[in-house]
Amino acid sequence: MLDQLLAALTQYGSPALFVVVAIAAIGVPVPVTLLLIVTGSLAAQGSINLWWAIAIASVGSVAGDQIGFAIGRWGGKKLVAKFSRMLGDAERIKKLDAKAKSWGGAGVFFSRWLVTPLGPWINLASGAADYSWFRFTLWDILGESFGATLFIWLGHVFSDRVQEVGAIFGDLTWAIVGVLAAAFLGWKLFSGRGPAAKQTHA
């Protein structure tokens, strides 16, 4: 897939970059971080303008994020509510909505570039939780602009070591996701044992 994406980027330039980052933001599994780094390398070779590439990548990513948010707001929430009634667990759904709101701007910002695999889920959850569209968009633009600038600039500076830089950030991203998942599971484990422990001592 990566070879096909690179071929499209080389052949079609900015339009291909826009489409790829947009569908990646929606949730299609695309190695977008490596693609941005390669875009920076192409900019170093003069194949594409550096700042134009950053602008296109930022706008395309924000467009995809907005689609995900809209699905969560006007489509996803209805589906979640329907399933919650079917499962008889509407209270848990309310808690999840509240948790999405508590993430706030930090969750949106860091999921744009530091923990990108969580980005599409944050978009859906934010929309379903009625998180402020204005705040979401503000942090979304800041995060996507920072991420596009960071990765394309790295590709520009280390144009001869694109694969190595991409691998480092790929490993770092999944390591962070793993830590967050472990922390979440640990919190669920101990929070679940609390009531049981109290009943045992009672």
Image (cartoon, helix red, strand yellow):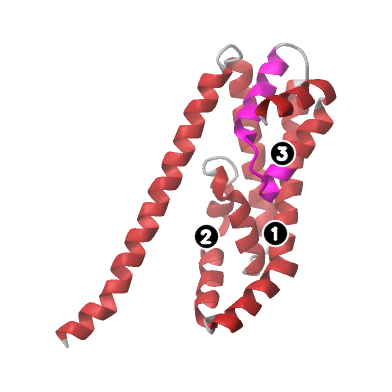
Q: Secondary structure at mark 1?
A: helix
Measured from the top left, where is residue 9 in percent x and y? 77, 25
Which comes sooner in the sequence, label 1 or label 3?
3
Query: Magenta segment range?
Result: 23-44
Residue designated by label 2: 103
Determine the CA span between mark 2 and mark 1. Answer: 15 Å
Residue designated by label 1: 69
Please determine whether, in this image, residue 125 is positioned above or below residue 139: below
- Image quadrant occupied by the C terminus: bottom left
Q: Say what amino acid the circle numbered 2 marks.
A: Trp
Q: For this view, does 111 lie left or right of residue 193?
A: right
Determine the CA span between mark 3 and mark 2. Answer: 24 Å
Measured from the top left, where is residue 28 in percent x and y? 67, 46
Which comes sooner in the sequence, label 2 or label 1?
1
In this rendered view, identify the residue nearer to me: 70 or 157: 70
Determine the CA span between mark 1 and mark 3. Answer: 16 Å
The quadrant where residue 32 appears: top right
Residue drawn where x is 64% and y is 65% of the image: 131
Q: Say what amino acid the circle numbered 1 marks.
A: Phe
Q: Secondary structure at mark 3?
A: helix
Could you classify mark 3 by the number of other residues whose Cα lies within 10 Å: few (under 14), some (14-19), or many (20 or more)? many
Q: Is residue 145 magenta?
A: no
Which comes sooner in the sequence, label 3 or label 2?
3
Residue drawn where x is 55% and y is 15% of the image: 161
Residue designated by label 3: 21
Furthest-bottom residue in view? 202
Give the label, 3 or 2, closer to the camera. 3
Residue drawn where x is 60% and y is 49% of the image: 119
- Main structural element of the magenta stretch: helix, strand or loop? helix
Q: Say what amino acid the circle numbered 3 marks.
A: Val
Could you classify mark 2 by the number of other residues whose Cα lies within 10 Å: few (under 14), some (14-19), or many (20 or more)? few
